[in-house]
Amino acid sequence: MGAQHPANGPPGGIASQEGRGSTRTLLGSLTGPEQRFWVLVVLVGLIAGLGAVALLKVLRFTQQLFWRSTGEDFLAGVAAAPTWRRVLIPILGGALVTLLTLIVGRPMRGHGTAGIIESIWVKSGRLSLPRALLRGLVSILAVALGAPLGREGALLSTGAASGSALAQWLRLGPGQARLLVACGASAGMASAYNVPIGAALFGLEVLLGSFALELFGPIVVSCVVATLVSRGLIADHPSFVIPDYTLLHPRELVLAMLLGIGVGVASAFYVRGINAVSDLLDRVAAWLAPFLPLLSMTVVGVTAVWLPQLLGNGYDAVNAALLGKLPLSLLLLLPLAKLALTATCAGAGVPGGLFTPSLFYGGLLGGAFGLLAEQVLPGGAPSGAYALLGMGAVLAGTTHASVSAVLLIFELTGDYPLVLPLMLSAVVSAAVSRRLEPESLYTAVLNRRNVRIPATVPHWLRQEGARALLKPVHQRVAPSAPLQEVLAFLLEQPLGQDLYVTDEQGRYRGALVLDQLKGHLPDHSQLHATIAADLMDVRVSPITPGLSLGEVAARFTETSLERLPVVDGQRRLLGTISKVDVLKQGTF
């Protein structure tokens, strides 16, 4: 039954009116560009959610078509397939990637997340939407046909590219463009795995490298919108359904810490293994490179004859490990085989994510640790509990992001009683892995391409770029203002400040700089007919409030002016920013 309203307060009474008034006050406190940006945040979440739903339906349709099974019974369909199908279908996936690589003329390699980080930090949020859509579709088809990679790569890249496309279309500043890209990527992950909290923290910790409050709001809104879309169109349940495990005995907490140490070492090995194979395959002859996807998927198909658990995402094997249904031999063999095939396919140019394979790797290693611990110390928690800890520990170890790893695993499994040991093993794993391998799974890829991410958080993350130093303009003149009026206003300006020319709509037209006017005035006989439009300097190019302070500082190196005008997307004059104020901020 619906909620009953009290007799003395009809629906929509004083409390409701106050709530609506607060909402109107909040919206009214935002400027037009800020309101537009929040609309875009919601729109990016909606697009990412719909895109994720579409790609996941393509995944399930393709699995049903070729394997006669989808989702949780994928392994059963693979196991029931005759040997020739296990070999031929992955080869078909490799042929598809090779064919499109030859048509496009460039490889489709990479798992997407590293490219998104590069776009945010280095390219001011620029991504190609057509390329992301094509790559995402190819990635989903390859995973459906057996590629041992993750489906999340396609969803992250398409969500990020949609944010970038909107930013470029509406000519947003680099700061807002970067944030929209992060919103789109996080929303893609949230909708793919039904993890709005973990995906939001992943976007902040991994993509943006900051938990700043002004970044938290947009990321959360996009993730919530995308998750609501996917829940409404697909399902609303944790990705893994496991028994209620509890690890609170002191002995079990010690084992969780030991697991974190071991998985930290395994995580560093995972990162190095992925990059070592990529380095090796980068050295092949140019004529052979386009055919590497076909060759790598052939290896996958042949291996699947004996180990069908390696095909695709590997959810069934992970679920079996979480339920304690895999023998120790497979718990030790499958992670190493998965790492080898994942590294081979990723390095060969088969597009896909590395997030899901890392969960497979960590979950099964954790399950193996649990079985061994049970043999040494009988009566403890079942191996499935340690499998869950292994998933979180390897995720923290490979990404160096323990906070988002804990929340992602919690949302993926819905198992709250294991949060404390999960936090312990994740933090220890991240510390050990970072000690052995300073680069994460994503920054290592960028370093191989000579792309360097700043070690410290830049100012565009700590504050809202030029907007933070914006000062209002108290005096401006029309293009038709006579010379006498212009000179009077100029002489009234404080030292270092100029006069700006704007039209009736407040749009910036040019600058009037007193020092530049000396020697450039017209003949004395023409002074009475001279107006502001004749004297303004149109070469003084304005900046936008979304620019980072580093970019603003670079603009000041190109001019002798002490201040630069700041305009919005419609070139309306918003104010000015001072060189002195920028320099006071220190490093950029």
Image: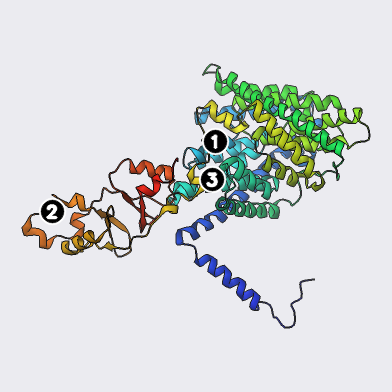
Quadrant where the C terminus sits is top left
Q: Mark 1 sits on what residue?
A: 115
Q: Which residue is mark 3?
A: 181
Asked where in the image residue 533 lies, by quadrant, the reply is bottom left
Q: Residues within 10 Å of mark 2 (few under 14, many from 20)?
A: some
Residue sitting at x 57%, y 56%: 42
User: Dot 1: within a 10 Å radius of its alpha carbon, few (fewer than 14), some, or many (20 or more) residues?
Assistant: some
- Mark nearer the viewer, 3 or 2: 2
Q: CA distance from mark 1 to mark 2?
A: 53 Å
User: What's the amino acid at mark 3?
Assistant: Val
| Secondary-structure class at tag 1 | helix
Dot 1 or dot 3: first in sequence order is 1
Left or right relative to 3: residue 129: left
- In this picture, is 28 found above or below 55? below
Residue most toward the bottom?
A: 8
Comparing 144 with 62, the one in front is: 144
Front residue of 59/260: it is 260
Task: Find disc 2 in the rendering and name its residue.
Answer: 521
| Mark 3 burial class by Cα count in 10 Å: few <14, some 14-19, many 20+ | many
